[in-house]
Image (tube, rainbow, N blue to C red):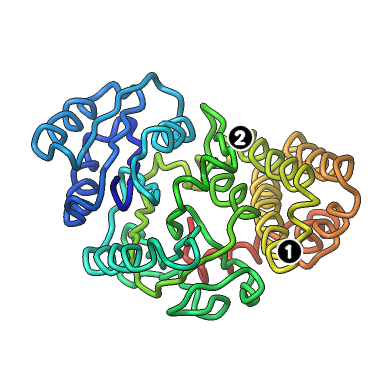
Amino acid sequence: MKLLSVAIPCYNSQDYMAKCIESLLPGGEDVEILVVDDGSKDDTARIADEYEAKYPGIVRAIHKENGGHGSAVNTGIENANGIYFKVVDSDDWVREDAYLAILGKLRELTGGEHTLDMLISNFVYEKEGERRKKVMQYRHPLPQDRLFTWDEVGHFHKGQYILMHSVIYRTKLLRECGIRLPEHTFYVDNIYVFEPLPYVRYMYYLDVNFYRYYIGRSDQSVNEKVMTGRIDQQIHVNKLMVDYFVEKKGLVASNRPMSRYMLSYLDIITTISSILLIRIGTQEALEKKKELLDYIRQKDRSLYRKLRYGFLGNCMNLPGKTGRWISVEGYKICQKFFGFN
């Protein structure tokens, strides 16, 4: 059994996947690199096969019909032989010294008195054209240098939350919680870091800048223009997260700090949906914004009140054109401060 499985979802990734794979090879025999070719039409499949031939037992090329990012992650989980599981997107990469530190910590924690469920590390926004790189770190809310539980997690700042780039899950936990990401849908990484949380008991935060998150390509799914064009998929993911939160209400409510964090995450996702709809600005978009809130209210009135009348909810629902202008300007300030697209 391997220590860590790393899935690399690839779709038409020929121009940048090699950098990603090469950054993961220093893990050696402890790591299996699952290059999941999601029905690519370029040379992705050939490159994946060449790496498998060159690094047998370390790199595995998996070819499948196109199903989208979520489908590729599902395939990675199904095929993983590692004790732990990580997703690295094909246009991203990892920093070697932090990578080796993480592998060392996973080795140390495996087989201990308590089972590690989730390891958290920092990620860096590698934004095109930006000399100063924004680091997303978690020193304030999370204990360091020891295993901890939800009861020891502090308060996350607004705009600070755990992304797919931050986490390594225990593989068996992902399978036991039954996570299955929707196919042909963007933004499912939010579901990936949301649904397993009620099953996570023991966590470890390693304060290293491990994951390098590249943003800046015009065709990236997180590019704002692309996101507004795919707003229906953003809303779909938002609703799926609401559904899950409501369906698992008893389990989520059993741990107050976890419940608080998941509610905050859902608040952020709903805010993103709202601000994108405001940015689109058409009557149809504003109707979709209203419909999303109506959906949440019908699902759970208590959840609706928390999301609609909390700080972010109030900021996203200021009245009239002036109110929407204020919401957008506030969003732009946050965009600059936090460094996202």
Q: Nearer the viewer, residue 101 or 11?
A: 101
Front residue of 97 and 215: 97
Circle number at residue 234: none
Looking at numbered disc 2 in the image, what kind of residue is underneath it?
Answer: Gln
Q: Position of residue 239 (x, y in %)?
A: 72, 40
Q: Position of residue 338 (x, y in %)?
A: 51, 68
Q: Residue at x 46, y 71 (%)?
A: 205
Residue at the extreme left: 54
> Which mark, by number, is residue 233?
2
Q: Is residue 228 left or right of residue 31?
A: right
Q: Residue at x 53, y 61 (%)?
A: 162
Q: Is residue 198 left or right of residue 184?
A: right
Q: Amino acid at mark 1?
A: Asn
- Residue 312 picture location, percent across and down: 74, 63
| Vertical order, 143 against 284 (above or below) | below
Residue drawn at x 70%, y 68% as measured from the top left: 257
Camera-near label (2 vs 1) is 1
Sequence-wise first label, 2 or 1 = 2
Few, some or many C-alpha atoms within 10 Å of disc 2 (few <14, some 14-19, many ≥20)?
A: some
Marking on residue 255: 1
**Residue 206 appears at what percent x and percent y?**
40, 72
Q: Quadrant of residue 176?
A: top right
Query: Is the residue marked by circle 1 packed among few (<14), some (14-19), or many (20+) residues within 10 Å?
Result: few
Q: CA distance from mark 2 to mark 1?
A: 30 Å
